[in-house]
Amino acid sequence: MPALTDLTLTQAIQALRKGNLSSQELTRAYLERIERLEPALHAFLTLVPERALAQAKAADRRLKAWRSSPSEPLPPLLGLPIAVKDVLCVKDMRCTCGSRILENFVPPFNATVVERLLQAGVVILGKTNTDEYAMGSSTENSAYGATRNPWNTEHVPGGSSGGSAASVAASLAPAALGTDTGGSVRQPASFCGVTGLKPTYGRVSRYGLVAYGSSLDTVGALGRTAEDVAALFVLMAGSDPRDATTLDLPVPKIDLGPSTSLTGLRVGVPDEYFITGIQPEVEGAVRHAVDVLASLGAMVQPVSLPHTEYALPVYYLIAPAEASANLARYDGVRYGPRLSGETMWDLFFNTRGEKFGAEVKRRIMLGTYALSAGYYDAYYGQAQKVRTLIKRDFDAVFEQVDMVAAPVAPSTAFRIGEHTGDPLSMYLEDVFTLPANLAGVPGLAFPVGFDRQGLPIGMQLMGPPFREEILFQSAHAYQQATDWHLRRPNL
Ligand code: GLN
């Protein structure tokens, strides 16, 4: 048997059920590895070893009872440890959003996704590092220090779910929850060589996710394989009375099995995603991966998403606009620390001025400006119109093909500090991930190669709304035929 921390979720489930492995052994193996590697990586903001071991112990009791009389079905993920991005509320566990303004916020409730996974039996190891309020592409905007890429600790893990991606890549957790507002699951998955899903907007509840850009925010998952991510997705998905934007559609059974045939599937390759400036090794690896899909039976054809170039300015108006409204609630009165002031306004000003980081303040200012009287139509209103055009591009393409294959980011993981002095150059890293959020469509990122420096390269498949199963089937077929997803950094 491979090392316990090398098991996929699917393998661990089987070992736990057979009694070859206990949840306490598995959880302890991850906690020990975290203790050894966390100082070099800083993937976590909060660790709860005692709580995790207590959960594992309870799971073992249930597994044991089930093995002696397997009458009732077991919760599907009973005893499996996972990590949770620190923007999702877990009851009685600190939730900082990577911000000083929520330094000691302890939510009294679970996010719906967390609740559903706890019902399914998972053990929570801790909360993972993130750019402050999920604003960023490198996890360098965390008020608690940057996370490092397990493949090369001089490089960023991507962001904002960089802690989750690094924890899976370094085998500190078999899987993790992340959120994707403009690429924050897919881009760190790509930079760290793991598989990550951004679901369709409305597929997974946002209740208990601390809001960034409410019309763009989605909760996704990261794991080693498409199969593992699918196992989490089917449990997370589904309508929720607490989130009125979730749709009441059946969640498909995703049966991946051993079949690797993609016969009949039509894959579109959009020209607009192969722009000048893209790292040649990224383009090469993605084009090669498309050839692999074709060799598995998929029919590949060029397609066009003509408004792609506008996604960046549109997103960087809409997301900050929504953020400026969502972050108005952090005033020093209702959550976290409070700085004093002579008047109420001074109190707000001092608390927000002191406790928000530079990037968050920049977004609040950008968003407030875009929404202000006199500029609203020119910026926010115009951005919404162009957003509709981007959405229509996808509608038109999905008349012709079943999914679109594209790079996740123009380059592999950049060096720590490379973009921190120039926010615009950081925003440019998001060009290929933003359109899916603006259009609300699902995207699945997974590793398709490495560059000369030994850093992972990712590809994303984007599909029609609520058709996540096509993406999982295709990525699974690809992973049956290749071994990029099995490579592990040397730690
Ligand atoms: N990098 C993008 C931003 O900074 C996306 C972040 C995200 O998806 N949370 O807004």
Image (tube, rainbow, N blue to C red):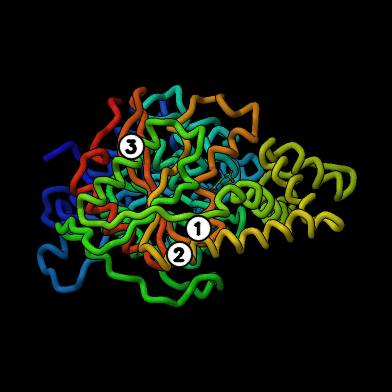
Above-or-below relation of 384 to 450: below
User: Label 2 crowding class (10 Å Cα cut-off): few <14, some 14-19, many 20+?
Assistant: many
Instruction: Name which residue lies at 58% across and 47% down.
Output: 309
User: Image point 45% across, 77% down: which residue?
Assistant: 248
Residue 486 position, x and y percent, is 23, 39
Task: Answer with left or right where residue 453 lies relative to residue 397.
Answer: left
Res 469 quadrant in image: bottom left
Residue type beneath disc 2: Val
Query: Taking the image as drawn, is residue 151 in sight?
Result: yes
Q: Are marks 2 and 1 in contact (CB under 8 Å)?
A: yes
What residue is shown with label 2? Answer: 204
Residues at marks 2 and 1, CA–CA distance in whole angstroms: 7 Å
* SS category of the residue bearing label 3: helix
Distance from disc 3 to disc 1, alpha carbons, whole Å, reads 27 Å
Q: Earlier in the sequence, mark 2 or mark 1?
A: 2
| Along the line of sight, the residue nearer the viewer: 402 or 470 | 402
Of badges 3 and 2, the one in the foreground is 3
Q: Position of residue 231 (x, y in %)?
A: 29, 59
Residue 243 position by quadrant = bottom right
Residue located 56% across and 73% down the image = 244
Q: Furthest-right residue in view?
A: 342
- For disc 3, the marked residue is 285
User: Which is closer to the viewer, label 3 or label 1?
Assistant: 3
Disc marking residue 63: none
Report how far apart the C-alphas of labels 3 and 2 lie in the structure: 31 Å
Q: State which tag comes first along the sequence, 3 or 1.
A: 1
- Name which residue type carries label 1: Thr
Badge 3: how crowded within 10 Å, few (<14), some, or many (20+)?
A: many
Can you identify the residue that label 1 sits on?
218
